[in-house]
């Protein structure tokens, strides 16, 4: 399907719903915990090496749980593979959720025409650690506080590092493989303009496109939740509104942490949460100007709507600064 970039959240809902046709009999699951060499636990050997060798993100928080795991499952549907690593057997509820999730990947890959002839492999670590801000106000945010996964554009492997919101993260990482949506070649002038406006440190590695990808993933996640739970279109709109309100609430936590200081972190939480709020709250307006690689227009859009988001955050009340949790969505999985 072409021209998905100019579809607003209601258009996307209708397209996904019209094409949604899951048949669980076509989805297969196998316990491969005790499989032979190269399968089972050994299949995750490369995943662990990537976690340990990453020079930018600190993934050490995954390793303790990783080393406790002794259960490996393989779920397959069409050209999508899920490899699940857990410290306990998968329950019936978890299996149903994972079945829904693998179908999500299949359908979005198809609708967005993402590497249509190629297989995708997901390596999913069901790490129970929650997203949470550092306890000390002065500590920088890192991968341990927010990140849920990663991928490499030239590979078709996706790695999920925690259970919380994994059903959204699988879509975020998939969209990084869309040859147009994954656009990071923003001009230095535009990056500088955003940093100056938002009070972001000059040395901060800023990827505003992460906010766009996260917005699409968040909206699609809400769409799928609504379809999977047989919600009406009216209830979908109410659910979307609640999720947008949640975005404002967690954006307030980020800006409260920033205070009057220049923002610096070891990941991309400002993009995932604050800049995402701009695109999410004003998505209908955003898609009218969005052409994937038009970062001049997108920067102008951010500049125009950032003050509006700040007003919404101020109107949100004082909030609970003692609650450090920054779960990305309002939904629970299993």
Image (cartoon, helix red, strand yellow):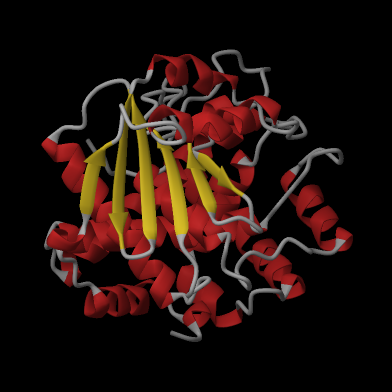
Q: In this view, does 50 lie to the left or right of 243?
A: right
| Residue 251, x across and y down, in percent | 52, 41
Q: Is residue 26 left or right of residue 129?
A: left
At a point 49% along the width and 58% down the height, the residue shown is 174
Could you tell me how many numbered marks the image carries?
0
Q: In this rendering, is residue 332 above or below 306?
A: above
Q: In this rendering, is residue 283 above or below 151?
A: below
Q: In this rendering, is residue 256 above or below 247?
A: above
| Residue 291, x across and y down, in percent | 63, 79
What is the quadrant of the N terminus in the image?
A: bottom left
Q: Please identify the residue farthest to the front as the structure is shown.
A: 36
| Residue 16, x across and y down, in percent | 30, 74
**Viewer-proximal residue among 12 and 244:** 12
**Viewer-proximal residue among 100 and 274:** 100
At a point 17% along the width and 47% down the height, the residue shown is 96
| Residue 286, x across and y down, in percent | 55, 73
Kindly indicate the quadrant of the structure image that contains residue 263. top right
Q: Please identify the residue farthest to the bottom as the structure is shown.
A: 2
Kindly indicate the quadrant of the structure image that contains residue 186. bottom right
At a point 87% along the width and 59% down the height, the residue shown is 188
Is residue 215 among what the camera can see? yes
**Viewer-proximal residue among 248 and 176:** 176
**Viewer-proximal residue among 215 and 74:** 74
At a point 61% along the width and 63% down the height, the residue shown is 305
């Amino acid at each position: 399907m072409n021209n998905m970039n100019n579809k607003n959240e209601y258009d996307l809902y209708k397209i996904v719903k019209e094409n949604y046709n899951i048949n669980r009999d076509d989805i297969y699951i196998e316990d491969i915990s005790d499989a032979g060499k190269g399968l089972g636990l050994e299949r995750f050997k490369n995943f662990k090496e990537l976690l340990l060798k990453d020079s930018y993100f600190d993934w050490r928080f995954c390793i303790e749980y990783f080393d406790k795991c002794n259960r490996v499952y393989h779920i397959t549907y069409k050209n999508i593979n899920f490899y699940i690593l857990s410290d306990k057997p998968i329950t019936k509820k978890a299996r149903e959720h994972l079945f829904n999730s693998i179908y999500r990947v299949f359908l979005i890959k198809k609708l967005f025409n993402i590497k249509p002839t190629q297989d995708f492999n997901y390596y999913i670590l069901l790490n129970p650690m929650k997203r949470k801000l550092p306890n000390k106000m002065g500590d920088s945010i890192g991968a341990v506080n927010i990140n849920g996964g990663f991928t490499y554009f030239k590979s078709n492997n996706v790695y999920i590092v925690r259970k919380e919101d994994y059903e959204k993260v699988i879509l975020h990482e998939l969209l990084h493989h869309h040859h147009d949506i994954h656009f990071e070649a923003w001009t230095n002038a535009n990056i500088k303009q955003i940093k100056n406006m938002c009070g972001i440190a000059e040395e901060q590695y800023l990827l505003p496109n992460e906010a766009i990808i996260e917005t699409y993933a968040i909206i699609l996640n809400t769409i799928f939740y609504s379809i999977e739970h047989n919600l009406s279109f009216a209830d979908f709109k109410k659910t979307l509104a609640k999720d947008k309100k949640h975005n404002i609430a967690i954006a307030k936590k980020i800006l409260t942490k920033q205070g009057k200081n220049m923002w610096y972190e070891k990941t991309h939480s400002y993009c995932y949460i604050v800049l995402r709020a701009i695109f999410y709250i004003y998505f209908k307006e955003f898609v009218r100007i969005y052409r994937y690689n038009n970062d001049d227009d997108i920067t102008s859009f951010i500049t125009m709507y950032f003050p509006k988001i700040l007003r919404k955050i101020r109107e949100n009340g004082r909030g609970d600064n003692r609650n450090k949790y920054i779960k990305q969505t309002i939904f629970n999985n299993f």
